[in-house]
């Protein structure tokens, strides 16, 4: 069986200031692996026409199996996405989408950002407790026929987002492995 073609483009979707900063860090790490910054596209999740055009409608040639869509999804209070990410999260949550919406279109990866300090009603919390948006998005993208490229990352602001760097290194390693 032939191996899948190497990645040609990466689409980084972010919503909110913190996720934008993390997406920029990811972009700087992955752009040399896919031919430079011309192949790394950062799109705000608030720009629903842009991400739908890129990943679903394929009006710009990115909805293909050689594209990796990385969602940097931040959870704020009450298990909600940031205001900027709301449009994207709601779009993928729609129950009217066919189970094949993302089939054969893109690979995806999800990195969750949360803050367990916002969970004042719990004594023991971790990154898993404050990343509900990323958890739900990851499950939904898979249910819509997307191909998970790597394990979901879950980061906690309370710990200084120390989980971000290891997740990026795992992603970089996976991209390098995919090229071979």
Image: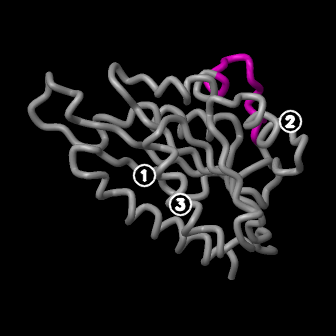
Question: Which quarter of the figure has residue 128?
Answer: top left
Residues at marks 1 and 2, CA–CA distance in whole angstroms: 27 Å
SS for tag 3? helix
In the image, which is nearer the foreground, mark 3 or mark 2? 3
For image coordinates 86% across by 36% down, the residue present is 57
Residue 112 percent across, percent down from the top left: 43, 43
> Which range is magenta?
91-102
Q: Which label was assigned to residue 57?
A: 2
| Quadrant of the image containing the C terminus | bottom right
Relative to 134, 127 lies left or right: left
The magenta stretch spans residue 98 = yes
For image coordinates 28% across by 44% down, the residue present is 157
SS for tag 1? strand
Dot 3: few (<14), some (14–19), or many (≥20) neighbours within 10 Å? many
The residue under label 1 is 153
The magenta stretch spans residue 156 = no
Relative to 130, 171 lies left or right: right
Question: Which quarter of the figure has residue 58?
Answer: top right
The residue under label 3 is 26
For image coordinates 29% across by 45% down, the residue present is 156
SS for tag 2? helix
Residue 93 vs 131, above or below: the answer is above
Residue 172 percent across, percent down from the top left: 54, 70
Relative to 129, 59 lies left or right: right
Residue 166 percent across, percent down from the top left: 38, 65
């Amino acid at each position: 069986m032939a191996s899948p073609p190497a990645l040609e483009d990466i689409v980084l979707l972010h919503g909110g200031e913190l996720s934008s900063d993390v997406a920029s860090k990811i972009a700087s790490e992955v752009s040399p692996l896919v031919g430079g910054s011309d192949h790394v596209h950062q799109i705000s999740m608030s720009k629903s026409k842009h991400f739908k055009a890129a990943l679903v409608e394929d009006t710009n040639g990115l909805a293909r199996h050689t594209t990796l869509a990385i969602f940097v999804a931040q959870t704020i209070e009450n298990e909600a996405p940031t205001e900027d990410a709301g449009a994207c999260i709601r779009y993928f949550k729609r129950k009217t989408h066919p189970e094949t919406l993302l089939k054969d279109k893109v690979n995806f990866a999800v990195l969750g950002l949360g803050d367990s300090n916002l969970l004042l009603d719990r004594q023991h919390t971790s990154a898993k407790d404050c990343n509900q948006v990323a958890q739900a998005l990851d499950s939904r993208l898979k249910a819509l026929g997307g191909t998970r490229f790597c394990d979901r990352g879950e980061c906690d602001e309370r710990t200084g987002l120390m989980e971000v760097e290891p997740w990026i290194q795992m992603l970089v390693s996976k991209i390098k492995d995919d090229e071979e």
